[in-house]
Image (cartoon, grey):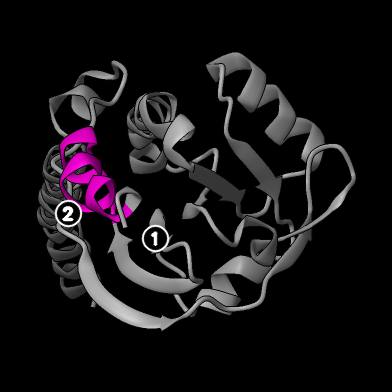
Amino acid sequence: MSALGDLSRKKRKMKKPGRVLALALVGTGLLILGVVTLFLLFGPGAVRGTQVEAPASVIPVAVDFPAPELELTDLNGNTVSLADYRGQVLLVNNWATWCPPCLAEMPELQAYYEAHRDEGFRIVAVEAGEPAGQVREFVEKYGLTFDVWPDRGQKALRTFGNLSLPNSYVIDRSGQVRYTWTGAISREMLEKYITSLLKE
């Protein structure tokens, strides 16, 4: 019996290194998969730990439906509504402070806004989830001059029926949603699709 017991213990000892090696290979594979995923989603900056560069912009989908009713509170505690922007071309951008593609597109949105606000273009950036104080700090840090609304209850995401971030909707002067994006937007795409609406 003792010889059989010794043999059984030796077999168990021999199995452990194989099990450890298998777990190490699985772990290494998952690590490589994670790095590749970061690279594909956010570019080389995400892998190096540097600032994320603006990813390639998605192309918007042309749509035509009435803008939904959405009422929130702005950073100054005032009640605000999408209806307040009737007569202007409005881009509603749903984003979050923790979302890399959202952060990457903010300078693009700011630059386009500065170039076209005198033509009746407005942006409402609705931050999905953070407290107003934290959103205000972000706005000041990045020098955003368009309207930013905190939305702790994620009402805007539910209203537009799109939980992916970032997502954006372009509303024309008559209150119709004309384009929708899911993903980061470049300045080039903004110029290509929105500038013509400003002339209508």
Where is residue 143 shown, x and y percent of the image?
56, 17
Q: Is residue 186 magenta?
A: yes
Where is residue 122 shown, x and y percent of the image?
51, 43
Mark 2: amino acid:
Val
The 10 Å Cα crowd at callout 2, few under 14, some 14 to 19, many 20 or more, is: few
The residue depicted at 29 percent of the width and 50 percent of the height is 199
The residue depicted at 16 percent of the width and 58 percent of the height is 19
Would residue 92 be seen by someone viewing this image from the given angle?
A: no
Q: Which residue is mark 1?
A: 170
Instruction: Please state the extent of the stretch shown in magenta in the rendering.
Output: 183-197
Which quadrant of the figure contains the N terminus? bottom left
Q: Is residue 132 magenta?
A: no
Q: What secondary structure is the stretch in magenta mostly built from?
A: helix
Q: Which residue is mark 2?
A: 58
Asked whether, in this view, residue 107 is left or right of residue 66, the answer is left
The residue depicted at 38 percent of the width and 25 percent of the height is 107
Give the quarter of the image for residue 147: top right
Q: Secondary structure at mark 2?
A: loop
In-front residue for pair 50/34: 50
Q: Which mark is residue 190?
A: none
The 10 Å Cα crowd at callout 1, few under 14, some 14 to 19, many 20 or more, is: many
